[in-house]
Image (cartoon, helix red, strand yellow):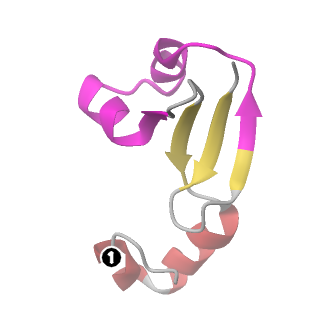
Amino acid sequence: MAIHYRCRHCETEVGLLPFDSEESVRKLHQLNKEEAEQYIHKDHNGDTTVDCICEHCEESLKQFPDYYALKKWLQ
């Protein structure tokens, strides 16, 4: 199975890696266990998704830094 990277704000698919292990992703990004639990999720069908941020949302957050306080700022 591949690892899907998805924007945590707009849910756009950002990328795909052919790794098949959450441990590989955690090591690749040097995440500690708590960070991995927050950003890496296993779906019911076994797929792994890593929450990240796309360029569009990153630019919006730069322009409107108050959005960082919101969990979900896109409707």
Foreground of the two, 31 or 14:
14
In the depicted structure, whether residue 10 falls above or below residue 36: below
Which of the image's four quarters has the N terminus? top right
Residue at x 50% of width, y 28% of height: 29
Residue 63 image offset from top left, x and y in percent: 53, 85
- Is residue 24 found inside the magenta-colored segment of the image? yes
The quarter holding residue 11 reads: bottom right
Q: Which residue is mark 1?
A: 70
Picture coordinates of residue 34, whole percent (x, y): 24, 32
- Label 1 sits on what residue type? Leu
Q: Residue furthest front?
A: 45
Q: Residues within 10 Å of mark 1 (few under 14, many from 20)?
A: few
Q: Secondary structure at mark 1?
A: loop
| Relative side of 56 to 21, left or right | right
Q: Is residue 71 left or right of residue 29?
A: left
Question: Residue at the spot x=68%, y=60% of the render?
Answer: 12
Residue extending farthest to the left is: 34
Is residue 10 highlighted in magenta?
no
Kindly identify the residue that appears in the image at 53 percent across and 39 percent down.
Answer: 50
Residue numbers of the magenta segment: 15-42
Residue 56 percent across, percent down from the top left: 68, 71
List x then y, in percent, for residue 15: 74, 42
Q: Is the residue 35 above or below the residue 8 in the image? A: above
